[in-house]
Image (cartoon, rainbow, N blue to C red):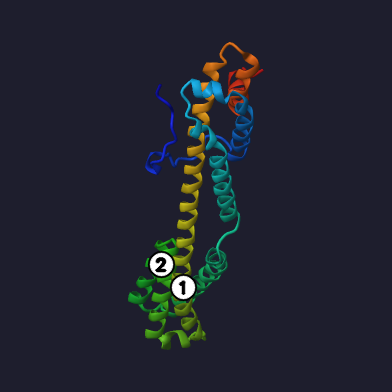
Amino acid sequence: MSTINPTTNSEEIKSTRPNQPVASFLQEAENLWIWCEDDIPELIKAGIDEAFLNELPQRIEACRKAQTIWETKLQTPGEAQVQWKLQVYEAQKLLTELLHSMRFAFRSNADLSDSLKYFAKESGYASLIQGLYTLSVLGRSNSQLLTAIGFDLDLLDTASAKSEELAALWAQSKNEKEYLTETTVLRNKAFWYLHQQVAEIRSAGQYIFRHRKDRYIGYISQFWKHKNKRRSTPDK
């Protein structure tokens, strides 16, 4: 008789978003393991491999661990992300201040005034980082015009330094987000790896006990039972 065995090829495991809350699914998997222990001989007879059945607790533990790591990373942003949020607000204020001052200082120079129009059109973090650096260079090249309006030239050095700081923080922040993405993929794969096994055991149990409601009930998902019931209930 052919038997259903564990899937060992990780490429075959889905990495899409779980189709139900992971916490509730883990509890259902735990309940299934306890429920099916008394039915192992019947499940084996129906074609479920014994090793496949005995692997259920390990898959539950792996999924639970992956979920815990994912939740921790989701709720605890990396240091670079924290610093980025703090620094980007100050950087935007500095860019706005530089533009206001330069528009006034360069008001009699059409070419310089036109060069500032570019910054009004651009948006986004990359433009912010580049804008601070470009304005610092532009300001140094026309420092006499800025000095004439009482502008603090030290702000140009601040802008240049802030641009470099933000560029480094942005790169680090993106790396942290990519790690969260990797953690999410691993969590999703752990969910579907467990889901695959739970589905096989439930399917076999529902077949074996199709005439015994007292045992059949342990092989259905209470989550989906209630969810489908709500969907089928007409609005009053």
Residue at 34% in and 75% down:
110
Q: Position of residue 41 (x, y in %)?
A: 55, 23
Q: Earlier in the sequence, mark 1 or mark 2?
A: 1
10 Å neighbourhood of mark 1: few (<14), some, or many (≥20)?
Answer: some
Mark identifier at residue 132: none
Q: CA distance from mark 1 to mark 2?
A: 8 Å
Q: Are marks 1 and 2 in contact (CB under 8 Å)?
A: yes
Instruction: Report the amino acid beneath label 1.
Output: Leu
Q: Is residue 162 left or right of residue 222?
A: left
10 Å neighbourhood of mark 2: few (<14), some, or many (≥20)?
Answer: some
Relative to 188, residue 142 above or below: below
Q: Residue furthest top?
A: 211
Residue at 54% in and 20% down:
42
Instruction: Report the amino acid beneath label 2.
Output: Phe
Mark identifier at residue 119: 2
| Circle 1 SS class | helix
Q: Position of residue 122 (x, y in %)?
A: 40, 62
On-image quarter of the C terminus: top right
The residue to which callout 1 is attached is 99
| Circle 2 SS class | helix
